[in-house]
Amino acid sequence: MVINRHPQILQREKTTLLVIDIQERILPAVFEHERVVENAIKLINGFKILNVPIYFTEQYPKGLGPTEPRIKAALDNTKAVQKMSFSCYGAEDLFDELKRKNIKQVVVCGIESHVCVLQTVLDLLANGFQVDVAADAVSSRRKFDYKIALDRMRSNGAEVTTTESILFELLNVCGTDEFKAVSKLVK
């Protein structure tokens, strides 16, 4: 008998992390911004342990500043994808690159939930990607906008989940060195 896994469970070989616009000048105004930074770093470090690709964007860095230093440090030498559009759809050839690399599942974190994150999620869905939004690693300046954005993303087909759930889905099994390293991240 063949036992099937649910097709929306994240699989390393077809997943990527997209960190959206966690930038210095806007971050202090964001609702629970330390939660966003802390969980984005957990995702980044977990994806590095699991050897899953990571992309990050910067929205108009001249105005919003560079990526927050702790996030930038976790990203190591990953190069920012610059954009002027709110959606990452307009970020250079990012969507084309994801398709070329046979990425099917995109994990999203960043700010602001109701603008850049929301528009990116909707555009990813429109282009056939499964999107998993780390609800504990996204936010907006106002709590109300954050909550409405999560509802809207979910109602349009995004999986709204958590950092820990994402990392353990990608792990798939316990008892490995990767499991031990990821477990330390989420404690």
Image: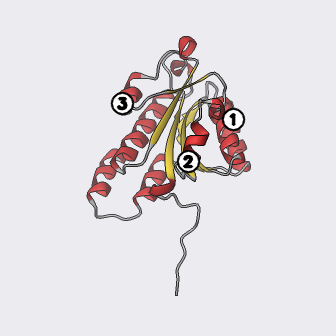
- Please indicate whether residue 70 sits to the left or right of residue 64 in the image: left
Question: Which of marks 2 and 1 precedes in the sequence?
Answer: 2
Read off the residue under disc 1: 119
Does residue 32 sit above or below 164 in this rendering?
Answer: above
Front residue (pair 165, 177): 177
Q: Secondary structure at mark 3?
A: loop
| Residue displayed at 36% across by 41% down | 45
Amino acid type at image mark 1: Gln
Amino acid type at image mark 3: Asn
Spatial CA span between label 3 and label 1: 27 Å
Read off the residue under disc 3: 77
Read off the residue under disc 2: 100
- Please indicate whether residue 179 sits to the left or right of residue 137 in the image: left
Q: Secondary structure at mark 2?
A: helix
Q: Secondary structure at mark 1?
A: helix
- Please indicate whether residue 20 sits to the left or right of residue 116 in the image: left
Question: Which of marks 1 and 3 precedes in the sequence?
Answer: 3
Front residue (pair 95, 27): 95
Spatial CA span between label 1 and label 2: 22 Å
- Quarter of the image holding residue 94? top right
Spatial CA span between label 2 and label 3: 22 Å
Residue 44 rendering spot, x and y as whole percentages: 41, 40
| Residue displayed at 54% across by 71% down | 5
Does the residue at mark 3 contact the one at mark 1 (Cβ under 8 Å)? no
| Residue displayed at 48% across by 37% down | 55
Here the colouring is secondary structure
Amino acid type at image mark 2: Arg
Does the residue at mark 1 contact the one at mark 2 (Cβ under 8 Å)? no
Does residue 63 sit above or below 94 in this rendering?
Answer: above
Question: Which of marks 3 and 2 precedes in the sequence?
Answer: 3
